[in-house]
Amino acid sequence: MGAVPKRRISKARRGRRRAHDSLKTFHLVECPDCGKMKRSHHVCLECGKYNGRQVLPVAEV
């Protein structure tokens, strides 16, 4: 016979355990090249630059 809980886990105990499982919001900073908001330490999706260098090709519209 496997491990079986002796008592039911209360709603409060379950909720305290799950308190840190929610998704966190991204920290956004302004891109120094184009001025759009981007995630810090990530490539800007608007201009394709990271740390002053062109990393992604820019799609012309």
Image (spheres, helix red, strand yellow):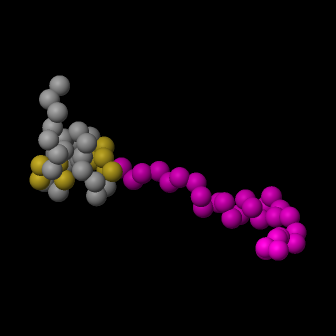
The image shows residue 9, relative to residue 29, as above or below, that is below
What residue sits 50% from the left and 54% below the top? 24
Residue furthest front in the image: 1
Residue 35 in picture, x, y percent from top left = 23, 42
Q: Give the quadrant of residue 14.
A: bottom right
Report the predominant secondary structure element of the magenta stretch. Answer: loop
Relative depth, front residue between 3 and 41? 3
Q: In which quarter of the image is the C terminus?
A: top left
Question: How many numbered marks appear?
Answer: 0
What residue sits 88% from the left and 69% below the top? 7
Residue furthest left in the image: 53
| Residue 35 forms part of the magenta stretch | no
What residue sits 12% from the left and 49% below the top? 54
The image shows residue 10, relative to residue 61, as above or below, that is below
Q: In this view, does 1 lie to the left or right of 39?
A: right
| Residue 25 forms part of the magenta stretch | yes
Q: Give the range drawn in magenta.
A: 1-28
Q: Quadrant of the N terminus?
A: bottom right
Residue furthest top in the image: 61
Q: Give the quadrant of residue 22.
A: bottom right
The image shows residue 7, relative to residue 40, as above or below, that is below
Residue 33 in picture, x, y percent from top left = 16, 45
Q: In this view, does 58 lie to the left or right of 12?
A: left
Residue furthest right in the image: 7
What residue sits 28% from the left and 58% below the top? 41
Q: Is residue 19 left or right of residue 10?
A: left
Relative depth, front residue between 8 and 44? 8
